[in-house]
Amino acid sequence: MDYTHLGRTGLSVSRTILGTMNFGPQTTEDDSHAIMDAAHDKGVNFFDTANVYGWAKGEGITEQIIGRWFAKGGGRREKTVLGTKLYGDMGDWPNDGKLSALNIRRALDASLKRLQTDYIDVYQFHHVDRDTPWDEIWGAIEVAVAQGKILYAGSSNFAGWHIAQAQEAAKSRHFLGLVSEQSLYNLIARDIELEVLPAARHYGLGVIPWSPLQGGILGGIIGKEDGGKRRLEGRSKEFVDSHRTQLESYENLAKELGHEPGELALAWLLHQPGVTGPITGPRTMAQLDSAVAAVDIKLDQDALDKLDAIFPGHQPAPEDYAW
């Protein structure tokens, strides 16, 4: 496993990040524990979750599964860089969601209890809160840092100007501010190249792509469909039908390069400046193996150029749309 610093911090994290969103809804607790043990065995030390995962309002099912895994001991918590998130409603009462100082305090304490730990390494804002001023947010986070309940703060789904707004507010308070940004980013979805990536690089945030395979579409969907291994429905089917030639070219290139399509998509992300590592949410052990294998893939400029030709990206703004 390769490691890198998370943004401008001294925190060393694996370049494969274990996403846990499937733990509970799609992966049993026993299998989830086995996957986390295997991740440690493979050198993966950065695990990502959220208080809403498990999709039963207020229960934090996925956090509870991770907490019971930590409780087994054996250095599990000590070996893990743990990230969780808040923003979504955890109840039906006012102040049960978003980023008010009150909810930050309550949500953090609730996550700590479910996770059976006394601190969170990277506490992340799952979405921008347009109704709460940054002085209030940073004031609450500074208290949590002083209490030893969190070490770093991160964001998710922020626009570039939201990152700038957050960092300038933190700077005025002589506070570290954000150290990471989780964004939708993959060969198909490249909009963050316009402003989010430049902002993250400027302010020293590590970029953590989520949905790196675009819901499985970059995982060899044409071959699986033709081989009868997967039947597409809804929007995925519409997208594949309208982009079939493009996806066929991609899968043929993967075959030419000697890689599985999903591993190639992950490897491409690891070659993008500013990217810490993609979040992969394995449902099975085989999917974990594939995610880890991508770290060792080295792509030359010719391969990167061919991928850009198949899936054109963006220049930074404003050059992308101005002279």
Image (cartoon, rainbow, N blue to C red):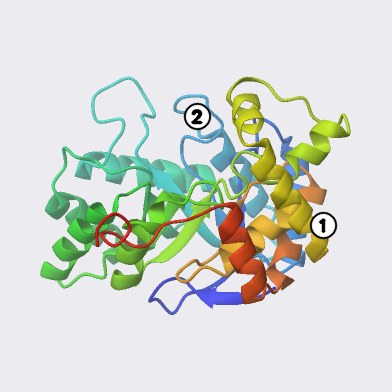
In the rendered view, would you say 117 is above or below 246?
below
Could you say where residue 47 lies in the image, as x and y percent from the top left?
58, 56
Q: Earlier in the sequence, mark 2 or mark 1?
A: 2
Mark 2 or mark 1, whichever is nearer to me: 1
Q: Residue at x 58, y 50 (%)?
A: 212
- What SS does tag 1 mark? helix
Q: Residue at x 51, y 34 (%)?
A: 60
Could you say where residue 147 lies in the image, as x and y percent from the top left?
30, 62
- Work out whether residue 191 or residue 256 is closer to the camera in this orientation and state it: 256
Q: Please indicate, yes or no, whether residue 36 appears anywhere in the rendered image.
A: no
Please indicate whether residue 18 sits to the left or right of residue 297 in the image: left
In the rendered view, would you say 201 is above or below 322?
below
Q: Residue at x 65, y 64 (%)?
A: 267
* Extreme-bottom residue of the structure: 10
Q: Which amino acid, mark 2?
A: Glu
* Extreme-front residue of the structure: 323
Please indicate whether residue 225 sits to the left or right of residue 197 in the image: right
Please indicate whether residue 43 sits to the left or right of residue 129 in the image: right
In the rendered view, would you say 312 is above or below 240?
below
**Residue 314's image quarter?**
bottom left
Residue at the disc numbered 1: 255
Residue at the disc numbered 2: 59
- How packed mark 1 is, by other alpha carbons closer than 10 Å (few <14, some 14-19, many 20 or more), is few
Please indicate whether residue 146 sits to the left or right of residue 121 in the image: left
**Residue 319's image quarter?**
bottom left
Could you say where residue 100 lies in the image, as x and y percent from the top left?
21, 41
- What SS does tag 2 mark? loop
Q: Which amino acid, mark 1?
A: Lys
In the picture, which quadrant includes the C terminus?
Answer: bottom left
- Work out whether residue 236 or residue 315 is closer to the camera in this orientation and state it: 315
What distance separates the C-alpha of mark 2 from that of mark 1?
44 Å
